[in-house]
Image (cartoon, rainbow, N blue to C red):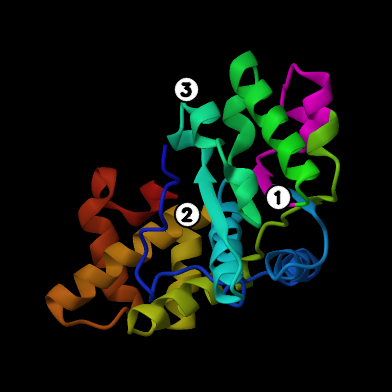
């Protein structure tokens, strides 16, 4: 069973430097330390969808590789019923990153596979970064010893972005794609569209394609027209 590779272009590669959020500076610093071979042996990050868990986990692997360390990123939602095989031999690597461990809760076989992996990593002094939507004791994990092990290191909450930080994120991603998103257009998107960061970034990619196709800048009137064409009922506000 091979680990899932990071199939990402350089331009789209998540980095710790590009992770935005003033309330998450300590968390980001701890991840940077861990992925460079220092700091905590185990970190547990939690936050609702759209707070950047996957960005941080992929960035941690990328940072570790840049520092010359071996690392593996495993999005557990893509390893259903194969965790024991996916975890085989991971203690040989220096950093293991497990994204969305919520999926193992309530499955005795998967819970034991993770329990066994944490024990092996601990015995071999390997670093572990885990993410979930909630802290360990709120995941519904049935194996008490696993709940304990999930809390062996710091348990850190990922704080949601403010509206201003969401606009900053959209502008940063736009520049990475080679175009500009005016501040007023970013604020307009927050006003009329869903505020979930994942969906906002998907919308940004769609607006990029529309802008290229029509050779238009992302002004509020142009964005309003794009949203109107795709919104149920014909008005952007229906999408909020």
Residue bearing mark 2: 198
Which numbered mark, 2 or 3, is in the foreground of this view? Answer: 3
- Is residue 197 positioned above or below 116 on the image? below
Question: Total of numbered circles in the picture?
Answer: 3
Based on the picture, tell me whether residue 138 belongs to the magenta stretch.
Answer: yes
SS for callout 2: helix
Q: Earlier in the sequence, mark 2 or mark 3?
A: 3
Measure how far apart labels 2 and 3 are at the Cα level. 27 Å
Q: Quadrant of the N terminus?
A: top left
The residue depicted at 57 percent of the width and 29 percent of the height is: 103
Q: Which mark is residue 81?
A: 3
Q: Earlier in the sequence, mark 3 or mark 1?
A: 3
In the foreground, 47 or 166: 47
Q: Position of residue 196 (x, y in %)?
A: 52, 52
Left or right placement of residue 93 versus residue 154 in this view? left
The segment highlighted magenta reads 126-147
Give the residue at the far left of this rendering: 213
């Amino acid at each position: 069973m091979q680990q899932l590779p990071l199939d990402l272009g350089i331009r789209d590669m998540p980095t710790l430097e590009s992770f935005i959020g003033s309330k998450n500076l300590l968390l980001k610093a701890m991840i940077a330390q861990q992925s460079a071979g220092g700091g905590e042996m185990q970190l547990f990050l939690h936050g609702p969808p759209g707070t950047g868990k996957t960005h941080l986990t992929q960035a941690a692997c990328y940072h570790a590789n840049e520092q010359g360390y071996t690392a593996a990123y495993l999005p557990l939602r893509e390893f259903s019923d194969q965790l024991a095989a996916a975890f085989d031999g991971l203690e040989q690597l220096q950093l293991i990153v497990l994204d969305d461990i919520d999926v193992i809760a309530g499955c005795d076989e998967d819970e034991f596979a993770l329990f066994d992996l944490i024990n092996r990593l601990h015995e071999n002094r390997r670093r572990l970064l885990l993410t979930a939507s909630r802290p360990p004791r709120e995941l519904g994990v049935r194996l008490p010893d696993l709940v304990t092990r999930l809390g062996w290191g710091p348990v850190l909450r990922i704080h949601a972005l403010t509206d201003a930080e969401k606009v900053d994120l959209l502008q940063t991603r736009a520049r990475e794609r080679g175009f500009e998103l005016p501040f007023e257009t970013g604020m307009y998107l927050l006003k009329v569209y869903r505020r979930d960061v994942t969906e906002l970034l998907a919308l940004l990619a769609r607006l990029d394609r529309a802008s290229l196709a029509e050779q238009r800048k992302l002004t509020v009137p142009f964005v309003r027209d794009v949203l109107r064409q795709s919104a149920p009922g014909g008005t952007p506000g229906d999408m909020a």
